[in-house]
Image (cartoon, helix red, strand yellow):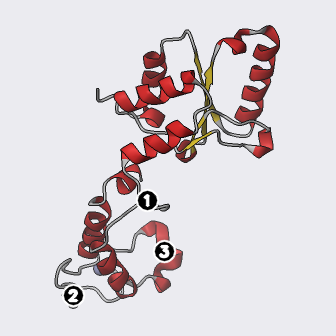
Amino acid sequence: MRQITEDPAVLPILAGKALEICHFDPITLEDKGAKTCGKACYECLLDYGNQPDHKDLNRHSIRDLLAELSKSECRPAGGTGSRAERMAALLKRCDSKLEQRWLNLVDNLKLNPPSDAQYLIESCSTKPDFFYSEYSAAIYIDGPPHDEPDQIRSDEAITQRLMEMGYAVIRFHHNANWNEIFNRHPDIFGKSRA
Ligand SMILES: [Zn+2]
């Protein structure tokens, strides 16, 4: 999914491959399965797992849509989406120098940028500093005020509540080794390519 949003070439490749699987030439749309396959066969859309749907599966009904997708250009919704532009927009929404430092590190290490900054999770009455919507991951950058006992207790309560609701919570303490934390979550941040 990430590749589709980040690389405009991926969706056309996928659509072309899907046409091939459905026995259509991805360029000319010639039906190469006319003799061997009617609406669908076990070489294309049918498998034992989708038997209840066999009567509805018809490779011809998706041909034109796939053909369109194979010539499409994929852009993130919300328009202009180069990495640099997204980073700049996120940077503007940072609340502190520490958050800016974190974001710049993400950028320098070529890690995945968060989808949001100061993202309100209403059900838990909390606004993580950053948020990865794809992973429901809330990121907190904890500066020195978070070392106060009262704040520690309240942070722990928020973490608990979020996890009960199915969110992942990752806290970057101002004194922690941030690279190490990134490395612990390659599924969310990606692998450092710096
Ligand atoms: Zn077939």
Q: Is residue 164 visible?
A: yes
Is 51 or 26 nearer to us in this picture? Answer: 26
Q: CA distance from mark 1 to mark 2?
A: 32 Å
The residue furthest right is 150
Q: Sequence-wise, which precedes: disc 1 or disc 2?
A: 2
The residue lying at 51 percent from left, 78 percent from top is: 53
Residue wearing tag 1: 76
Q: Residues within 10 Å of mark 2 (few under 14, many from 20)?
A: some
Instruction: Kindly check if marks 1 and 2 are in contact, taking CB atoms under 8 A apart as contact.
Output: no
Q: Nearer the viewer, mark 3 or mark 1?
A: 1
Q: Sequence-wise, which precedes: disc 3 or disc 2?
A: 2
Q: CA distance from mark 3 to mark 2?
A: 24 Å
Residue wearing tag 2: 31
Instruction: Give the quarter of the image for residue 66.
Output: bottom left
Instruction: Kindly check if marks 3 and 2 are in contact, taking CB atoms under 8 A apart as contact.
Output: no
Q: CA distance from mark 3 to mark 1?
A: 35 Å
Residue 143 in the image: above or below residue 112 = above
Instruction: Give the quarter of the image for residue 111.
Output: top left
Residue wearing tag 3: 51
- What kind of element bears circle 1? loop
How many marks can you see? 3
